Image (cartoon, coloured by chain):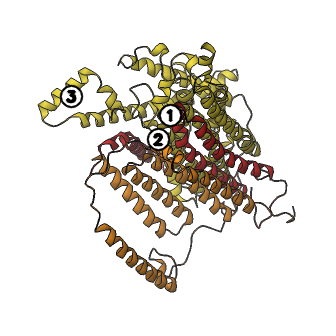
Chain colours: A red, B orange, C yellow
Amino acid sequence: MSNQALEVFMPISIMMGIAVLLFIGALLAAKFLSPFKPNKNKNMPYECGEEPVGTAWSMFNVRFYVVGLIFIIFDVESVLMFPVAVIFKKMVSLGLGSYVLIIFLSFVFILISGIAYCWKKGDLDWVKSYTKTSIRDAE
Amino acid sequence: MYYWILFLTSALLTIGSSVLMLWTKNLIHSCIFLLGSLIGIAGLYLSLGADFVAVTQIMVYVGGIVILMLFAMMLTGGKDFVSKRQKILDLIPLMGNKKSLIWASLVAFVFLLSQALLLMKIFSSVKVLDEVSAYSPSVEKIGELLITSHELAFELSSVLLLGALVGAAIIARPKKGRGN
Amino acid sequence: MENTIGGFFLKFDFIKNAIASGSSAIGFDLTMLFYIMMFLVGAVAITALLATVGGLGTYAERKISADIQARIGPNRVGPFGILQFLADGIKMMTKEDIMPSGADKFLFYLAPFLCIFGVFSTFAVIPFSEGLQLTNLDIGIFYLIAIASLVGVGIFLGGYASNSKWSLLGGMRGAAQIISYEIPVTISIMSIVLLSGTLSFTEVINMQSGFPHNWFIFHNPFTFIGFFVLFIAGLAETNRAPFDLPEAESELVSGYHTEYTGIRFGLFALAEYIEIFVVSGVSVSLFLGGYNLPGHFLHGTLGAQPLQFAIFMGKTFFLYYVVIWIRWTFPRLRADHLMTICWKYLTPIAIFNLIGCAFWMVLFNGKSFYDLLMH
């Protein structure tokens, strides 16, 4: 079993391999060239001179998660739109332009209404007008 | 030749990352091994000639879902992300106690049995291909299908995405009246 | 395989004859070996180019910022200080590699690797000239957008693994910023895909020509706005000022790469400067005519390659200069302004451009503004 035409993807693997080699090479070079004298004061995480208290990992605000969710929705939407966008020009030259336009626009319109709803209800604000209280609310 | 290199690397990456994902005790590490496993699956799609699906996998899963999971983990916080139990059953890379292990094995056995009986019937009547069909770019074909035969699915998927968007926004909304 | 760098060089007779005679002399077919050799040579050449561009980018930044701030900048190491980046690189390699106590070792190692991996993998499809493109994938544009999102994961992990509250804050904000600004980038690129009907870089560039009136930026008013949306959102994706809150020096003490020292920090910085080159290169290819010589001069010949390469690099370096210029001109944006600009301004404008381009395609059958005026 073989697939001759897949070789067109070989440069991608080669560039990925070069990235791996570069990373390993840089680290090896640094290991030989740089000193290694760990010391309690040097290894402390930086906090402008104070001693850090506790670990850094605390609970974060929910707005990061909302941004992530909205991003996923738009990402999937744009991925679904790409094949239609690629075929658009060919369909226009075949005379089916308005048909594809209506399909495309209804897809975009349904998602615009979603983002308009989020905007109106204040989900896109980074600083909410009323804050959410939780047990330990950092940021 | 390159097909074999691509297939073996992706398969090793997928399986290795999945095993490590189940084995590790640290939650964030397990999310990163999931990332490796998803990249491996993208490579597997590519070896089958589905270039658009492979790149979609990277764009949506690797660029989006993994970051979303990391955000969700940071959102729920926790002291560390490491689980600390050290009983003998935890040294095996499975999750749970004895009862869940027994039930899971039973369910898995029944499932595999039914699948094997089903698939044996299918496999006995199908000829195995000698050559994977040659790679040809697939975006235009997917586009044509999306517009002609699967147009309703295309529009319904946008409604599904709208539902997901509004649902997520409502769930993540702060409750009024909790004070300032 | 004709779409790759090997395929381009095989179109010329003297190379074809050389390979044929070599194959008949040795006994087996040398074409695949030729392809692989061209890939390796091209990849190594691109890596060398990247390292130089990344290093010279730091030098250019210091010189241009000095010029804007009415001072001189580095001028000691080599003529006009041009070897400063080599000195910086050697300095970084000899600095000690400190890992903060309590840091997550595996993720600490992985974060700069993901950034470098994401950025280097995009160079397999960037169109330097007609033949000097490592491979001309049919999904090249889509592949580039997808693989560049690995940098966001790298930034988040860099912030998380450092066990420092500043780094974590910088990492979270950086990841949120990168994923948010991916949407205007994707939608702006989609309006170009709409106009050209293909996802491969070479086809998009072939639809433009060397003269400015045929560039996609002047194709219709929607793509004109689209170029600026793409450029601004691309700036924000590379965490570059005025969007550099994740690594803000005065607020977060260098943000997600606070705890990184020595060559690891060097890798983060290298990835950032190379990513600026990628964003500029993509904007040039899609909107500003790419490597086209005016009037399709010497199209398809070997002699045109250096000229096309020079044109592509010239345009990209011009945009690089604009990026550096913007950094030292505008003040930094606040965190909520950052998100507001993306979701409330750039994304609606990008969607408006997309709809406008779709209408333009149907109403005017894809003719550019210039074509409509002239005929």
Q: x%, y% of residue A35?
A: 48, 47
Furthest residue toward front: A95
Disc 3 target residue: C19
Q: Disc 1 marks which amino acid?
A: Lys
Say which quarter of the image contains residue B141.
top left
Q: Is residue C96 visible?
A: no
Chain hosting mark 3: C
The span from disc 1 to disc 3 (Cα, nearest Å) is 39 Å
Which chain contains the residue that carries disc 2? B
Question: Quick one: label 1, few (<14), some, or many (20+) residues within 10 Å?
Answer: some
* Contact flag, marks 1 and 2 (Cβ < 8 Å): yes
Q: Secondary structure at mark 3?
A: helix
**Residue C96 in the figure: left or right of residue C133:** right
Label 1 – label 2 distance at C-alpha: 10 Å
Q: Nearer the viewer, residue C73 or A51?
A: C73
Instruction: Give the quarter of the figure containing the C terminus of chain A.
Output: bottom right
Exactly how many numbered labels are in the figure? Answer: 3
Mark drawn on residue B140: 2
Residue C301 percent location from the top left of the image: 36, 18
Q: Determine crowd level at label 2: few under 14, some 14-19, many 20+ residues with C-alpha closer than 10 A.
A: many
Which of the labelled discs sits on residue A54, or is there none?
Answer: none
Instruction: For mark 2, give the secondary structure.
Output: helix
Q: SS at mark 1? A: helix
Q: CA distance from mark 2 to mark 3?
A: 35 Å
Tag of residue A90: 1
Looking at the image, is mark 2 or mark 3 nearer the viewer? 2
Question: What kind of residue is marked 3?
Answer: Ile
